[in-house]
Image: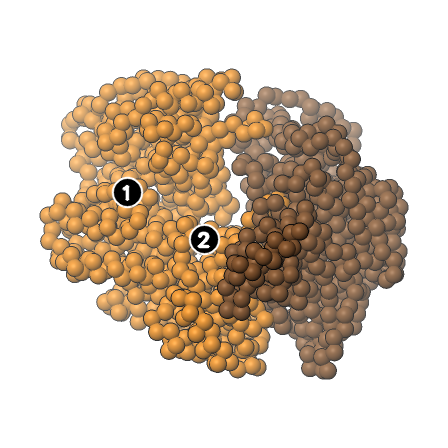
Chain colours: A brown, B orange
Amino acid sequence: MTKKINKKNNKKNNKKNKKNVKVDPITLQVIGGALHTSAREMGHVLYRMSFSSIIRESEDLGAGLFDANFQTLSESDSTPLHIGSIPGYLRGIQDTLQDGEWFEGDVVVHNHPYHGSSHSPDLAIAIPVFWKGELVGFSANTAHHIDIGAATPGLIIDIRDVYAEGMLFSGIKLYRKGERNDAIWQFMESNSRTAKMLIDDIEAQIASARLGEQRMKELISEYGIDTFKSACNELLNYTERMMRQQIKAIPDGIYRADGWCDDDGRNRDKKLPIKVAVKVKGDNVTVDLTGSADQVPTAYNVPFEGSTKVAVYCAFRSLLLDQAETEVYIPSNEGSFRPIEVIAPEGSIFNPKFPAAAEARFTQCNRVIDCIYRALSPVMPEKITAGNSASLSFISYAGLRPSGDYWVFLEVNEGSYGARARKDGPDSIDNLMCNTRNNPLEDLGMHLPMVCERYELRDDVMPGAGRQRGGIGVVKAQRVLTDGVITHECDRHTDVPWGAFGGSEGAVGRVQRYNIKGNKQITEMPAKFSDVDINADDVIAFYGPCGGGYGNPLDRPAEQVLEDVLDDFCTIEHAKKAYGVIVTKDLKLDHKATKTLRSEMSK
Amino acid sequence: MAKIGVDVGGTFTDLILEKGPRDVYVHKVPSTPEDQSLGVIRGITEICEIGQIARKEIELIVHGTTVATNITLENNGSEVGMLTSRGFRDILHIARHKRPYNFSLQFDVPWQSKPMVKRRNRIPITERVMPPNGKIVTPLNEKEVIEACKLFKQRDIEAVIICFMFSFLNSKHELLAKKIVQKELPGVYISTSCEVIDVIREYERFSTTAMNGYVGPKTSNYINNLANSLKKEGFKSELRIMQSNGGVATVDMTTEKPVTILMSGPAGGVIGGKWAGNLSKEKNIITVDIGGTSADISTIPNSEIRIMNPRDTYVGDYPILAPMIDLATIGAGGGSIAFIDKGGAFRVGPKSAGADPGPACYSKGGSEPTVTDAQVALGRLDVDRFLGGDMTINPDLSNKVIEKKLAKPLNMSVKDAALGIIKVINSNMALAIRANSVARGYDPRKFSLMPFGGAGPLHGVALANEVAAKEVIVPPAPGINAAIGLLETDMKYEFTRSAPLVLENATKKDFDRINRALSDLEKLCRERLSADGIIKKQQKIIRIAECRYHGQGFELRAELPNGKLNSNNKNIVINNFHKQHNLDYGYTFGSDQVEIMTLRVVGIASVKPMTWPKLKPLAKGKSNAKSLKDAFLYNRKTTFDDGKTVTCPRYNRDKLLAGQKISGPAIVIQHNSTTLIPPKHKAYVSTYGNIHIQKN
C-alpha cells in the first residue's frame, strides 16, 4: 500500500511535529540508545556487504536516521565528513525530487554537489519512513564509490567543470513506490569504469537503509508517534544544550588564524590563502571564511552545504564535545550544529558558483579545522592541538586488465596529529575530519597488480619538538606491476604545521616517483597531480606531514627523550639539537652534559 | 568418572564436583587475584573433602581462568621482541590507521602509547615473499636474525614473535627464522604468525601473534605450575583449560597458543546456559550472565553455541583472530552507578562501584547509588538474607543516596528514581541482547531468556518482556552456572588454512589442493583428539569454508559437504553461503561468484552430559498450595516495575518441588541468588529444578 502525500501535507505534518508530549528522562534514554544502535547496525551492514575496498576496508561511508525536517537523529561511528553531510543531501533531494513528492517504497539516489552533496563520488541512498501515511523521517546513508564515470578514473582534480565529474543524480528514484526503475540501473551499468562494483555497492547501501527504516518503524510502534517525535526533539535539545554550555565557557571575542594551500592542481605558482575568523558571542559561534581564496578553475573547490559547513561542525564537536574527555555518551545529532554559523562568500573556494567542479575538497576542509584550533589556542590552550597534518592523501591507481576491463584502486593515506597539552601527537593516523581504515597490504596484493614496498613511520625528518612532541607522518611506497594511471589529491608541501607555545613546527609532506627496476632516479612530485601515466614497476612514495610540537622542548624530561631515541622516534642528533639532551653512543643519558647544555640553551 | 569444574571469577572461585550420576557437590572459595592457583588448589582440595572422595579418584579437572585476560586488562605482559619484514616495522604501531574516536582531540592511542611490542624491539629483517602466489624473491637474511637474537638477549626479551608479510602464502621464512631463534635463544617463548593464525591481512595476523607472545610466558607458567601443584597434591587427573571457542584443550595446547583462552571466563557460562536449557528440553536460549560490573550476553539457537566470525573478534583494543563464542559484554551489573550528567540526562553505568566500596548499602563507604541499591530500596533484596545471610546490608544508606543524588535533583520520589535506575539498566542490557539476537536474524519470541550470575534472576523477567522472549528460565544454581558449564564442555581443536579459490572457476587441480588441505587439517584434529585418548568413533569432525562473494572483504561461514569437494557438490557450499549471507544481511548477490578464503576444520569429542539430580516431585494427593507452604518464608512489601507496592511472599528455593506452581508476585530466595516473579506472571518448577516464568 502506498499513500500519496503532497508538499502541502508535508507542511501540515511539520506543524504536527510541534505537538509535544512530555517524555520522562528514562524513556528518553531508552529511545536515544535505540536510535544510536540502529545507526551503527546500518553502518555495519553497509561495510560488511560491500565490494569496493574504499567502502569495505576503509569504511568511507556514513549512515543514520533523520526526522522529517532532515535533522540528524543518530549516526554511525564512521567517517565524520559523511555523517555530518546527510542532512544537506536530504534538503537537496527535497528540491529536486522526481515526482516532486515522496511515496512509501521510494529509494532515492543523489550526489549533486550543487544540491547539497558532499562531493559527487559520495552517493547517498535515502528512504522515506512513513507511519500511517505520514512522512515521519528518513533512513539514509552515503558511501564513496570508486568510479562514477568522471573524466579520469577514480579521482579527478584538473578538470573544467562539474559535468566532468561523472554521473550526477539529483532526486532520482531507484525504486518508485516499491518498484525498481530498471532504466536507471541499466544506465548506471554503462557509465562507470567499475560498473559491477558500483551496482553491488548501491545494493549494499539499499539493504542498510532498509534496515534503518525498519528500526525506526519498530521504535514508533513501541512508543507511539507523539512520544517518539517529542523524544527526538528533546534529544536534539539536549545535545544543543551541551554544545552551548561549552561555547559559553569561551571568552567572547574574535579569533583569527590563517594559512595557505599549495596550489589548485594546475596553476602551480599560485598559493591559495585560507583565512579563518572565529567569532564567539555568548553561546553562539560564527566561523567566517571571508578573505580565503577565490574559487579555482579546477575541481579543488569545496561544496558549501555538504562539506564546508560540515567541516566547521566537526571542528567544534571534536573540540567541545571531545568523546575521550566526556564520560557520557552525547547523542550525535543536529543539536550540535545549531549554535554554529558558517560564512563563506559565494564565489570563494569554500562556496563555489555553479558549474565549478568541486570534487577534491578534503584538504581545504581539514585546513579550516586546523586554523580554527590555532585561532582559539590563546583561550583554550588545554583543549587544542598544535599544528596537524591537516591534509589528506587520496590517491587513485587504475589500469586496464588484459580483458579490457578497468581496475581502479582508491587509497586514503594517513596524516598525523599535533602535540597536545598533556600528550604527544599520535603518529600516522587519520587526521581531523578523516577517520577511515587502511587497506590491508596483503588484500591489495591478492586482488590488484600492485604491491607495497614500504609502510612505516617516516625517518627522513623529525616531527615538531616540544614538551610534547608532534606525531610522525607515514611513508607508504606503492608499486604498480603493470602500466596504469594515477591521480593524487593532497596538499601541504609548503605550509608547515605550526608549533604551539614554544614547540617547534612539524614537517611538510612530499611525494616521490621512481622506477624500481630502472635507474631509480627520483622525481619529486607536487602534492596534487591528475591523470599521470605510470609504467610497470613505478613506485609512488608518499611521505605524510608531521605534527607540530607543544611547549618548550627543554621541558621534556630527559628520560622521555632517551626513550624516544631508543625507539627511533628521535635521533641522537635531534635529541641534542632540539631538546638539549645528550645521549651517548651506547644509548645512555649523559646527565651532566645534558644539564649544562639545557641551561645554555634556555638562556 | 569423577570430574571437577573450577571457574575463577573476580570475587569468588566457584567449584563443582560430579562424583557420579546424580551425585553432585558445589563449593565457593574467595579468589586469590595475586596468584589464582592458590584459590584453585584450595577449592579443589576442599570440595574433595566435602564430596568425600579421594584425590586420586578425580579423573578430570576443567579450569576456566581469567589469567590471560587479566594480563591484557592490567597491561603487564612480557617483554616481546619481533622479527618482521624490512620496510614494515610499524604495522603494529599504525594498526588500521583509524582513531578510537571520531570526535576527539585529546584521545589516547593505546597501541602507540602502551604497545605490546616496543618499537625498539621490532627488528626489520631482509626477506620477501610476493603475492599472489607466494614466490620468494628475496631469501631470508639469516645473519640479521642472529644479530637480532643477540640484541634480544641483551634486553632480556621473554618472548619472540616472527611476523613476515604474505606468510599466509608461504610460511618458509617464518619457520626458518623460528629455527634460528630456537637455537640462539633456547628457552625463549616463540610464536610465528603462520602457526598462531594462518590468515590473510597483516595487521590482524600480527596483532594476534603479538598478543600470543605478550600473554604467553606468564600464562604458560601459570598453567604449568598449576598442573605441577595438582600432581604434588596427589591429583592424578588431567588438567584441561577452557578455551574462548567453547571447547577445552590440553595444557600443552594452551601453553602454545594462550591467545585462545582470552575469553575462557565467560565461555563457561554460555555452555552452562545450554546445559540448563537441555534440562527442560529447551533448545533456543538467550543467556544473560549478570555480575557486579558487567553482563555477558549470548544467543544459542537450536542448542548450538555460535562462534564469532574471527574477523569480528576483539580483545580490548586489539583484533584477536581466535575463535570465540559469540557473546557480548556490556558494562551493566549490580554495581553500576546511576547519575545525572551535566546536560541533565539520567545515566546508569558503565562505571561501577565494583566490590569495593561496592553499593552504598554495603556500608563500605560507597557514596553513589547503584543498581543493587535500587533493588534494595524497592524491597527486592532482603537485609537478613543477602548472600544467604553471609553479608549484612543497610537499606537506609540505599534510600539516602538515591534521594540525595537522583530523587531530589530530579524532583521525583525515591521509589520513582529507583525504578528509573532499573529501567535504564534493563534497557541498556536489552539493546545488547537485541544486537546479539535480532540483529543476527534470530527472533527472540522463539527463545527462552536465561538469567544467571548472582544478579541475573532479578532482571530476567523485565529483560524477557523488553526483548519479547517467550519465557524466562532460571537455572537450578544461577550462582555457579559457569562452573557447571565447564563440566559440559567438549574437547575441541581447530585448525585453519588460507586457501583462496573462486568456486565457479575451480578446476580439478584446485579441488585436489582444497581436499589435500582439508585432509591435513582433519589429520591434525584427529592427532590431538587421539592424544587425549579419544577413540576415532567418538571423534566428530566439522569442516567449514569461510567464504565471501568474490571482491567482498568479509567472510561468512559455509559448511562443506561430506567427503571430497568436487565440481558436482560445490553448489552445496555455494548455496550454504548464499543462505548465510541472507540470514546476516537480508540480501544475496545471486549472480555473483562465491570465493573460499579460509578452510577451517574443527575436531570435537563430546563429553557425557552431567546427570543432574532430579528434584523431588510434588507428593501425590498433596495440593500445590499446601506444599508451597513448606517453602514459604515470610511476606514483605515489594515494589515491582509497574510502580505498585504490594505484599509479596518469599519462598525458599531449596524447598521447592518439581511440578510446583507459583503465581506472582513472589520472590524465590536461594543462597547466592534471588528470583523475581512479578505480578501477572506465573512460574513452575521443572523436573530438574529450572524455574520457568511466563506471563499470565
A189 lies left or right of B661: right
Which label sits on residue B152? Answer: none
Q: Secondary structure at mark 1?
A: strand
Using the numbered discs, state the Cα–Cα distance from disc 1 to disc 2 in whole angstroms: 23 Å
Q: Residue at x 36, y 41 (%)?
A: B289
Task: From the top left corner, tell me how far across and down residue A174 is, in percent.
Answer: 72, 49
Q: Residue at x 40, y 57 (%)?
A: B77
Which residue matches tag 1?
Answer: B12
- In this orientation, which residue lies closer to the viewer: A369 or A486? A369
Q: Residues within 10 Å of mark 1 (few under 14, many from 20)?
A: some
A28 lies left or right of A410: left
B637 lies left or right of B176: left
Above or below, B399 relative to B604:
above
Chain containing the residue with disc 1: B
B14 lies left or right of B311: left
Q: Is residue A417 visible?
A: no
Which residue matches tag 2?
Answer: B315
Q: Residue at x 62, y 70 (%)?
A: A454
- In this orientation, which residue lies closer to the viewer: A493 or B546? A493
Chain containing the residue with disc 2: B
| Residue type at numbered disc 2 | Val
Above or below, A356 relative to B458:
below
- In this orientation, which residue lies closer to the viewer: A586 or B187? A586
Q: Secondary structure at mark 2?
A: strand
Task: From the top left corner, tell me how far across and down residue B85 is, in percent.
Answer: 54, 72
